[in-house]
Image: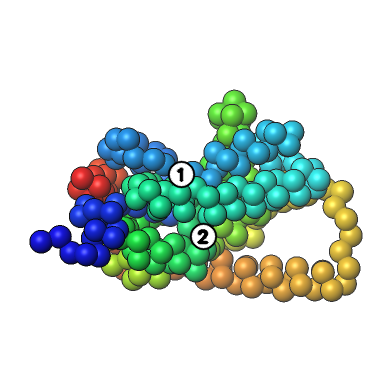
Amino acid sequence: MIKLIELLKGGTEPPKALIVAGAPGAGKGYILKDIDLGSLKTFNIDNAFINLLKKSNVTLDLKNATPEERSKAAKAMAAATKELKTSIIPNAIANRESFVLDGTAASFKNTLALKDELEAAGYEVFMLYVYTDLERSLKQNQERFEKTGGEDRSLAPAIVLSTWNSVTKNYQPYRQAFGNNFISVSNTGETMKDLDAIIDQYLTPYKPKDTLPKSPKQKERSEKQWGKLKTELEYLLSLDKDKDGVIDSSVSRKAAADIINQFLS
């Protein structure tokens, strides 16, 4: 007998959502190619973001953008995020459509709120977490604009640094929150561990020029935020991720594809 709650939710087959987490340059799209998504919709905030940048005549090479262009880019990202949160995903939920959310999942709070909302609507929710090291994330971002012939964006490296920090420290909380519906893939190698060296190579050459001077209060707040971020980054870089960490707990790209294909089928 079909339960009343199943009728109210529109059917007995639950829709499914695959949330993809990972820093810029982690290789999320590369891994998704191995997964049989069929006609499943994929929501990627970067697509809307890039379109808005083009409409605003803002360079996609944001690592070399002017302060004015970076300000416009921040507004474009806010608009793309708002559209995803207030229109695209709610419409998919209302229509009980299965989908893939291909993003960074940098915000643990927002991602868990979405997970709760989806499960309350009758969805089965799975997370694919793709780990990469900080240097690879920065390097891939730095080269992306040129490698794609100007078709894809290169973010400001400071944003990549902050996003990597958020995504990486969220690994264990996500693993605990999603339980059996969680799998991670590691996409990394031997890289620099010294944060100052990483900053000198990947951030310093692209430090914004001609920015407006900060007030003493703004400067104090900025220095406090940077100090906190730097402490967290140094801690994450010091961890042995091979032993009882993300690398040790991850599976191969093929194994991840097999498990997710089974979840989606």
Residue 209 in the figure: left or right of residue 258: right
Q: Which three-letter amino acid code belongs to the residue tagged 1?
A: Phe
Which residue does the numbered mark 1 point to in the structure image?
43
Q: Secondary structure at mark 1?
A: strand
Label 2: state its secondary structure: loop
Point out the residue furthest to the top here: 149
Q: Is residue 255 above or below residue 166?
A: above
Question: Which residue is found at the position 57% from the left and 40% from the top?
Answer: 48
Q: What amino acid type is highlighted by mark number 2?
A: Ala
Q: Label 2: how many residues lie within 10 Å, few (<14), some (14-19) or many (20+)? A: many
Q: Which mark is residue 106?
A: 2
Front-lying residue, 124 or 107: 124
**Residue occupying image coordinates x 74% and y 46%:** 72
Looking at the image, which residue sits at the far left?
Answer: 1
Sequence-wise, the earlier of marks 2 and 1 is 1
Q: Residues within 10 Å of mark 1 (few under 14, many from 20)?
A: some
**Residue at mark 2 to residue at mark 1: CA–CA distance:** 16 Å
- Quarter assignment of residue 213: bottom right
Q: Is residue 196 left or right of residue 23?
A: right
**56 with respect to 93 (left or right):** right
Q: Position of residue 95 (x, y in %)?
A: 38, 48
Residue at x 41%, y 64% (from the top left corner) = 117
Can residue 186 be seen here? The reply is no
Q: Nearer the viewer, mark 2 or mark 1?
A: 1
From the top left corner, tell me how far across and down residue 65 is, in percent: 75, 41
Can you say whether 78 is above or below 222 in the image?
A: above
Horizontally, is 112 left or right of 265 in the view?
A: right
Residue 229 position by quadrant: bottom right
Residue 4 picture location, percent across and down = 22, 64
- The label shown at residue 228 is none
